[in-house]
């Protein structure tokens, strides 16, 4: 078992490894990456799912999910500034908890990032396909086999475009991302501006029609404030993609905490404004579980033109989510390849300073998922993978405070035990509030991962090759 608990040595803050990626990002680009990852299909669609499960009390669900993510964001801020490595929670777990824990976290992050990219690509295709079919594009090439088609070609195409952008260079893709993020924010503020005059407090009564605790109702749907919070959690995460850029950050000790905490603060404020005006402008049952709740609300108050703008923005701006998560997954794969869990040649860096091979591999994996597989049936697993990673980060924060108390911490979280336990406890509660089917699939996924580690990972890791034991 000692081989399973071997840990990577901690690199002091400011010290870079010999194979580190060139630094090219500062906090504005990092914050734009975080906001671009967080604000996506979550707020555009999940508010409808949320009110279907919690009613107007979805406001509490947003607050709970945001509070848990705020604790996780603070933990990420300390660890990313302390260990500016490309692997995010995977790297922190390797240094703080041990190899087998790092493998499980890395395996969970693969689940999170792959499913998010694939799900968002399929969602983008849903907006773009009607336009394509209007100009004669075959319908069979706009949906996967599970829906009676051949392949979801628009989803594959948008992944290819975003991957090509990443291959151009980190700085170039960050600039384009920043522009699209501004477009998304302006659109959501436009929604708030047009719905706020229609706010009616009567629409908030009854405020909590389905109760607080997650439960299965007579229709077989899991409802309650916590059930909604477990789903809405999808709308908040994405800031963790910032930590995967730590190695490419010019001043990680300053820029990473600003970007992680700043992006969470901006997105939480926007989400609460959008959620409050949405449930106040229209009775919640009007748009409950709608695939386009914001556009539906705008049409219901006579703002069809603005509704069209919101729908169009989804086509234009959703690729920012793809860019952030595809970028993040490629960097996690890069860290795992360096550690021997993937073939080391995949860690090759091009002359433009990008991990070309690992980016292409990542794009290929998510393109297959988006183009051919029934992604909608397993998309909820992304939440499970994220919650596992967040719990690991909370534990790492506390473990490293005891194991390496004197190691320099450029950003030091106050009330670390409260933040760490809040992250672990909150994420565990949300994790247990997920549907039972999702939890079973998560268990199967991690059992497969542990099997792969037992037969491959523990022998191929660089620490195993150098004879390091726990």
Image (cartoon, rainbow, N blue to C red):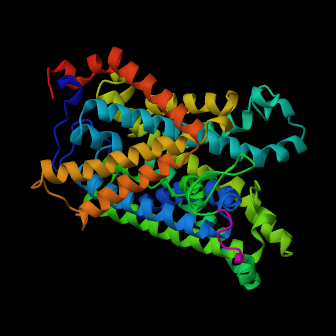
**Is 376 left, or right, of 448 in this rendering?**
right
- The chief SS type of the magenta part is loop
Q: Is residue 164 visible?
A: no
Q: Position of residue 192 (x, y in %)?
A: 67, 76
**Is 403 left, or right, of 459 in this rendering?**
left
Residue range (magenta): 204-210
The N terminus sits in image quarter: top left
Q: Which residue is more in the foreground, 5 or 190?
A: 5
Q: Position of residue 46 (x, y in %)?
A: 65, 56
**Is 226 left, or right, of 148 in this rendering?**
left
Q: Is residue 352 magenta?
A: no
Q: Is residue 147 visible?
A: yes
Q: Residue at x 43, y 60 (%)?
A: 68
Q: Residue at x 77, y 34 (%)?
A: 143
Q: Residue at x 34, y 39 (%)?
A: 90
Q: Which residue is more in the foreground, 97 or 31?
A: 97
Q: Which residue is more in the foreground, 318 or 191?
A: 191
């Amino acid at each position: 078992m000692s081989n399973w608990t071997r840990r990577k040595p901690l690199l002091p803050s400011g010290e870079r490894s010999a194979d580190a990626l060139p630094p090219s990002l500062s906090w504005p680009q990092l914050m734009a990456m975080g906001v671009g990852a967080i604000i996506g299909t979550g707020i555009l669609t999940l508010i409808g799912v949320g009110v279907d499960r919690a009613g107007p009390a979805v406001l509490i669900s947003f607050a709970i999910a945001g509070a848990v993510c705020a604790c996780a964001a603070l933990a990420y801020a300390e660890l990313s500034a302390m260990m500016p490595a490309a692997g995010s929670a995977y790297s922190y777990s390797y240094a703080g908890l041990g190899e087998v824990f790092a493998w499980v976290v890395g395996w969970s992050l693969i689940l999170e990032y792959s499913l998010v990219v694939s799900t968002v690509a399929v969602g983008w295709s849903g907006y773009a396909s009607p336009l394509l079919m209007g100009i004669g594009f075959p319908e069979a090439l706009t949906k996967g086999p599970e829906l009676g088609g051949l392949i979801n070609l628009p989803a594959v195409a948008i992944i290819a475009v975003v991957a090509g952008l990443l291959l151009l260079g980190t700085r170039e893709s960050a600039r384009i991302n920043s522009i699209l993020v501004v477009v998304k924010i302006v659109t959501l503020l436009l929604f708030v501006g047009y719905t706020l005059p229609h706010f009616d407090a009567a629409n908030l009564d009854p405020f909590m029609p389905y109760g607080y605790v997650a439960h299965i109702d007579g229709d077989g749907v899991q409802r309650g404030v916590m059930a909604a919070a477990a789903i809405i959690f999808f709308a908040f995460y994405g800031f963790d993609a910032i930590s995967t850029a730590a190695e490419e950050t010019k001043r990680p000790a300053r820029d990473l905490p600003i970007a992680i905490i700043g992006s969470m603060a901006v997105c939480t404020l926007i989400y609460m404004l959008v959620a409050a005006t949405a449930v106040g402008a229209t009775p919640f049952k009007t748009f409950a579980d709608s695939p386009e709740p914001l556009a539906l609300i705008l049409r219901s108050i006579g703002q069809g033109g603005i509704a069209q703008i919101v729908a169009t923005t989804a086509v234009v701006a959703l690729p920012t989510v793809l860019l952030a998560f595809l970028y993040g997954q490629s960097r996690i794969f890069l860290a795992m390849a360096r550690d021997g869990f993937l073939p080391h040649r995949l860690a090759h860096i091009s002359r433009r300073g990008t991990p070309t091979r690992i980016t292409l591999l990542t794009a290929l994996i998510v393109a297959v998922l988006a183009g051919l597989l029934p992604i909608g049936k397993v998309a909820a697993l992304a939440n499970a993978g994220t919650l596992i990673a967040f719990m690991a980060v909370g534990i790492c924060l506390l473990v490293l405070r005891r194991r390496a108390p004197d190691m320099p911490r450029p950003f030091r979280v106050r009330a670390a035990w409260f933040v760490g336990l809040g992250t672990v406890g909150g994420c565990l509660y949300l994790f247990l509030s997920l549907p039972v089917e999702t939890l079973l699939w998560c268990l199967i996924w991690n059992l497969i991962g542990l099997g792969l580690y037992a037969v491959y990972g523990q022998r191929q890791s660089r620490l195993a090759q150098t004879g390091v034991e726990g």
